[in-house]
Image (spheres, rainbow, N blue to C red):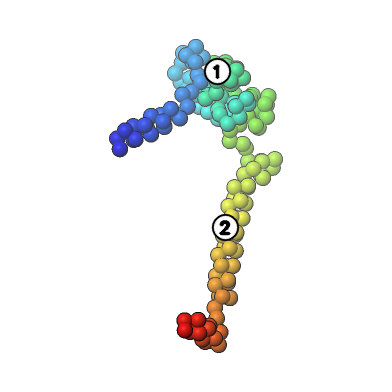
Amino acid sequence: MIRVLAVVLLALAGAVPAGALEPGERLADPALEARAREIGKTLRCLVCQNQSIDDSDADLARDLRAVVRERLSAGETDRQVVAYVRDRYGDFVLLKPPFQPSTYALWAAPVVLFGLAALTVVVVLRRRRGAADVARLSAEEEARLARLLDDGRR
């Protein structure tokens, strides 16, 4: 049991992203580096698409990490840095898309899908209940069935 637990824990530890930030990329100022890491977690790697630039090993992600650090070192705010990257690559670069008319469908899709799934469950359960009601026999049919079963036992 302990061996199985150890194997599972080792497998889970291997599944955690190690982070792609190389030691040479780090800023000397810990506060600026922390800000750069937070910004990097919100920007999508355009090559990997499901990873942040902070977690990606792609060359473009490395370049974007450098841009973020350069702009922070130049004194820009976090919003200004994100706006700079967003202006060049569009909303797709943001891991959390903004709530605006072009993304309403994206934000509404989970709610709509959940509503459709709930409606489907309700309809299926009502049909099953209705089917059970239809399957009931009248008193006359039950008597006839009982006679047929008795005849079959003889």
Q: Is residue 148 above or below residue 18?
A: below
Tell me where residue 108 appears, x and y as whole percent: 63, 47
**Amino acid type, label 1:** Arg
Kindly identify which residue carries mark 2.
118
Most foreground residue, 58 or 96 = 58
Mark 1 secondary-structure assignment: helix
The residue shown at (64%, 43%) is 106
Mark 2 secondary-structure assignment: helix
Residue 96 falls in image quadrant: top right
Most foreground residue, 7 or 97 = 7
Cα–Cα gap, marks 1 and 2: 46 Å
Outermost residue, right side: 102
Most foreground residue, 150 or 68 = 150
Q: Is residue 82 left or right of residue 154?
A: right
The residue shown at (68%, 29%) is 90
Q: What is the crowding at mark 1: few (fewer than 14 residues within 10 Å), some, or many (at least 20)? A: many
Position of the N terminus, as image quadrant, is: top left
> Mark on residue 51?
none
Tell me where residue 67 appears, x and y as whole percent: 59, 18
**Amino acid type, label 2:** Ala
**Does the image show residue 88?**
yes
Residue 102 falls in image quadrant: top right
Kindly identify which residue carries mark 1.
69
Q: Is residue 42 above or below residue 137?
A: above
Q: Is residue 4 above or below residue 138?
A: above
The residue shown at (62%, 25%) is 47
Residue 138 falls in image quadrant: bottom right
